[in-house]
Amino acid sequence: MKYLFGASGHAKVVLDVINSNNDTLGGIFDDDTNKNSFLDIPYLGQYEKHNEFSNDSKFLVSIGDNSLRKLVVQRIKQDFFKSCHNLSIVSKYSEIGLGTVVMANAVINAEASIGNHCIINTAAVVEHDCYIEDFVHISPNATITGNVTIGEGSMIGANTVVKQGTKIGKWSIIGAGAVIIEDVPDFATVVGNPGKIIKYNEQ
Ligand SMILES: CC(=O)SCCNC(=O)CCNC(=O)[C@H](O)C(C)(C)COP(=O)(O)OP(=O)(O)OC[C@H]1O[C@@H](n2cnc3c(N)ncnc32)[C@H](O)[C@@H]1OP(=O)(O)O
């Protein structure tokens, strides 16, 4: 049986992805014990409760914030599953890691490699030969053109365009609507067209 962690807004969209494949979910865990249910799936208790479930259970952390998602992933003892919306287009020549979710209308082209626990959000495009590390979030409608590298934990804002061959570092944040035409260092926040660094984030 499959289960979600984190009863967030993002989890509602993850649930739609899972439903699109006619997959069945056993329920959702969240540290907030005030929840009784989440949309039409049962609330199962706080995160540690998953230790009581059978060894063949599979999990997906449905938390949008990249750092928080990583923290929760590190608390889970068992295996993860990935899920791609049945209206996404995923090349058979691409790779997608465990714990990753691909939303409706997203496109992942040939020889793109997507890490573990990533979010490829609604209608995002990840072009051929891109290399996306773990815990990255590509927001709705962002276009990652060919041969781009994105480091662990980076957040690419909605409608961003990243020019081919560019390297984006780890744990950087690219503001909504930015156009990235040159490499971005680790931990930088970049906004605008052309993208400019406005600050560095805490490590
Ligand atoms: C399904 C979903 O919802 S997925 C989520 C998708 N979400 C997004 O795409 C949002 C991405 N986040 C952003 O764009 C944010 O504005 C950030 C992260 C870039 C900046 O947020 P903060 O760190 O809080 O910065 P803050 O709001 O203080 O802005 C700092 C400066 O940058 C400017 N700025 C902020 N965001 C942008 C942007 N996207 N484009 C251009 N300028 C921007 C602000 O106007 C401000 O300028 P000023 O100093 O001249 O006044």
Image (cartoon, rainbow, N blue to C red):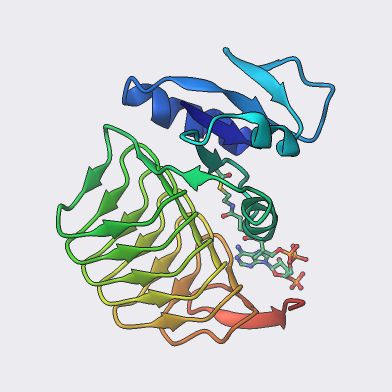
Q: Nearer the viewer, residue 89 or 38?
A: 38
Q: Is residue 110 visible?
A: yes
In this view, 18 is above or below 102: above
Residue 15, given in percent of the width and then of the height, sits at 49, 27
Instruction: Describe residue 107's horizontal placement relative to residue 121 as left or right.
Output: left
Q: Nearer the viewer, residue 115 or 178?
A: 115
In this view, 13 is above or below 68: above
Residue 42, quarter of picture = top right
Residue in the picture at 44% in, 77% down = 180
Which quadrant would the C terminus be assigned to in this image? bottom right
Residue in the picture at 66% in, 37% down = 51
Residue 146, given in percent of the width and then of the height, sits at 25, 72
- Classify the position of ligand 1 by quadrant: top left, top right, bottom left or bottom right: bottom right
In this view, 161 is above or below 186: above
Residue in the picture at 27% in, 77% down = 147
Residue 179, given in percent of the width and then of the height, sits at 44, 72
Instruction: Describe residue 119's horizontal placement relative to residue 106 as left or right.
Output: right
Instruction: Describe residue 26's horizontal placement relative to residue 17 as left or right.
Output: right
Q: Is residue 7 visible?
A: no
Residue in the picture at 57% in, 33% down = 4
In this view, 152 is above or below 116: below
Residue 58, given in percent of the width and then of the height, sits at 48, 37
Residue 166, quarter of picture = bottom left
